[in-house]
Image (cartoon, coloured by chain):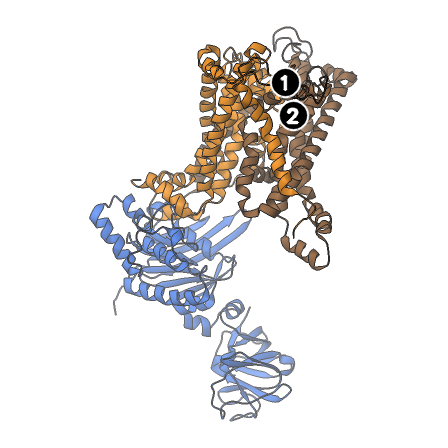
Chain colours: A blue, B brown, C orange
Amino acid sequence: MSAIPPPPAVRLEAVSKRFGEHTAVETVTLAIAAGEFFSLLGPSGCGKTTTLRIVAGFETPSAGSVFLNEVEITERPAHLRKIGMVFQHYALFPHLSVFENIAFPLRLRRTEGGDMRQRVSHALEMVRLPGLAGRMPAQLSGGQQQRVALARALVFHPSVVLLDEPLGALDLKLRKAMQLELKTLQREIGLTFVYVTHDQEEALTMSDRMAVMDRGRVLQVGDPRSIYERPASRFVADFIGVSNFLPGRVREVGVEATIELDGGAVVRAGPEQLTVGQTVTIAVRPERTRLAGAPGEATVGPEGRWNVLPGVIRELIYTGSDTQYFVELGPAGVVMVRVPNDTPPEGRHQARPGERVWVRWEVGSTAVLLA
Amino acid sequence: MSVVDQRARLWAVLAPPVLWLGALLVLPLLLLCAFSFRSGIGGSLFGDWIVTLDNYRTLAASPSFLELLGVSVGIALVVALVATLLAYPVAYYLVFRVRARAGMYVALLLIPFWISYLLRVMAWKVILGSGGAVNGFLLWAGLIHEPISIFFYSRFAVVITLIYVWTPFVALPIMATLYRIDRSLLEAAAGLGATPAQRFWRVTVPLSLPGVVAGAVMVFIPTVGEYVTPLLVGGSTGAMYGNLIQDFFGRSANWPLGAALAVVMLVGTLVLVGATSRISRVERFIQ
Amino acid sequence: MRHRTWPLPAYYFALLALLYLPLAILLLFAFNSGTILVFPLKGLTLRWFGQLFATEALMRSLRNSLLVAAGSSVVATALATCGAIAFVRFRFKGKGLFITVALLPLYVPFVVLGVSLLLFFSTLGVPRSLLTIGAAHSVVSLPYALLIVTARLVGFDPHLEEAAMSLGANYWQTLRRVILPLIAPAIVAAWLTAFTVSFDEFAIANLVVGREPTLPVYLYSQLRMTSRLPLVVAMAAVVMVGTLSIFLALAWLRRILASTPASAAGATSALTARA
């Protein structure tokens, strides 16, 4: 346990960016630790790319400051920041060979001859493309181009690497493979990666920590698990994975909070900062819900560790690895229950549309959202 | 980079062309407009400047000026129409038949256009000359016994020459328009039972019409102001509006009146251009 | 989809033949030993070409044209490159106005441009000369150069500049090592186009010419004299062949422009090897 934590590699303090009338980034404060794989996640237009570009130096913030290893770089031009960047479409120089592309930053720094050659081939080995030094970018596949772009961004030993949706142009299979490779590479080199993506699955897979953004604001920062299991807002719960949402009002607060749903059914959640009478939304992940033909170990109503609600199956969809049951819980709403198709028959309930069933989930899986 | 740097860099790049064009294009045209309101042809250029509308009054009141303008517009219309009609089958051929190898064919078509405007008009002058290569050939071949007058310098010669000059050029915008027609529309029409002729007249032609009209306008506008071709092959009957302007700035020195004539043409051109064309079209055509 | 009734290829080739016919006739007369252009030809000779070089005024006007074309095309290309960069890479109000003005010479009849410049130079007290012709030509050929360079820049990945900067290159280094090598073919094409436009230009040159004529102006002045006609025709033939070669060079360059970056790289990597 070190007494003093190392300074964050990148820190943004109340950074805002306005383009005329439009605010792209609003009061963003983030601290990204050294050696961390940090993702900026959000839908298009949420400001994640603009934030990245501010760190890179291609945009100057309208307000706020940017720090690199606690040195302020807000006004410093991009070419003096020593930050590596990988673009979505790689931005390889088409008139230069792979070797020359990677050597570009070295030539600027007057690294010459044998030293340069060595560093370039080392970079190529790191991204697993030895022997392609003589090719031209147009002769490479998408995946290869991306690796060359990465090698080029790493070869001059930056302290931070920024990646702007680098896998966006690749097909699904390749993307999955590259996600793993990137993660492994990052861990091996130990560099700080700041990664922008709109694919929440990608962010959850690769990040040590992530920030979810919407409309210029950071909504939640945390590691993938806490973001997934404890979404702070409706937007986050909706954007990350799939959630069931049920509107309701707070009835009691205390060790457990009690929320009354439309139609009278009552649901319990863990201790939350709520006030009685507040309008809230309950969020439950489909995979945390279970189907039962009978109330099971609990009677209908709030008891034990489970929330149990009666309903009628409206629809079921077979998706190969699991089955999705859409159950109407009376006036409270419809929930989707995801049941893996490999559950042993005893634990699985074979249900058909029109049947009455009970849906239950652990009290601890209930997320209570205000907005 | 900071906003200030960006602005500085923008001005560093934008200033030269803006200043140059401002001085050598905008200023002269403005000067021309201003000068058209000057009366009298005597005295120093600026010393004896009296503002007046006289020049325009003279213009409006003079039937010969107006007639010449009308003739020029008429010639330009005929040239634009005929050139477009002649070029259309070529464009169609290159886009729908030749397709991929069209580059070579287009190049062949354009080489005369690029070689030289003056030389091509000169070639016609030589051919239509007083000896008259065409007449001479026909006489020598015994096909006629007397020179045919239409092959002399005349308005007809101007029209023919201009059609010759512009036809290769107007094929380009027509090609661009035809190229952009969605082939699946034609296939759909075929599927519905349309014959090739019907497909052409009911699908291809209507869809290509806007672009074709734009191309024709691109021929029309500069042709109205033509003065070189009439100068070379127009003879006495083939003068156009542009020759009048040139004359007033040349032999029959009356610069203010000439300026007024030029301003009328300028305004007419700008109105036409504003009404019909879009600059991006021009960009594609020139490519 | 065969059009049985429309002999389109025949039409195309017939039109092509008609297009080239006057030029062919002109070329033919350049070799004609008689001074009058009638059929049948008197005989074939090369003496007019020989006389070309002997005619001092003609050679002078050729020299003048080359000078004017060279000067105005360089200016036009440089300005067009600036304008293209500003237009494609920057945001500013009045972009539309700028482009409209820059492209005006494509729409406005040359006679109007010519007399406006005549008036302008007279007002300033600038005597008409090759300089005034050159200035006029730079304005007139600028639109062509602008369109060519702009087209190239538009197809240019905007992230390339940012990539270069992220790797440590300041703006001038980026310009030198990344932007210029990639737009070099377009700049050359633009320059050649501007050169051709200026060399052939007659309408405006005729209006702002001083004591030294350009080639087209000189040729025009000789057209009245029938004895001079063969000489003029011979010069025309030479110009045609010369312009044709430039045109072919342009076409070759366009192939490079439109080709894959790989071959573009092949052509330009030699230039940037020691960048």
Tell me where residue B50 appears, x and y as whole percent. Answer: 68, 11
Most foreground residue, A281 or C39: C39
Which residue lies most toward the left here?
A: A114
In the drawing, what numbered circle is on residue B232? Answer: 1
Please, which chain is the residue tagged with disc 2 on?
B
Q: Is C58 left, or right, of B172 in this rendering?
A: left
Please, which chain is the residue tagged with disc 1 on?
B
- Among numbered discs 2 and 1, the one appearing first in the sequence: 2
Tell me where residue C18 appears, x and y as whole percent. Answer: 62, 31
Q: Is A7 left, or right, of A298 in this rendering?
A: left
Q: CA distance from mark 2 to mark 1?
A: 10 Å
Tell me where residue C174 appears, x and y as whole percent. Answer: 37, 41
Most foreground residue, C27 or C118: C27
Disc 2 vs disc 1: Cβ atoms closer than 8 Å?
yes
Label 2 sits on residue: B161
In the drawing, what numbered circle is on residue C96? Answer: none
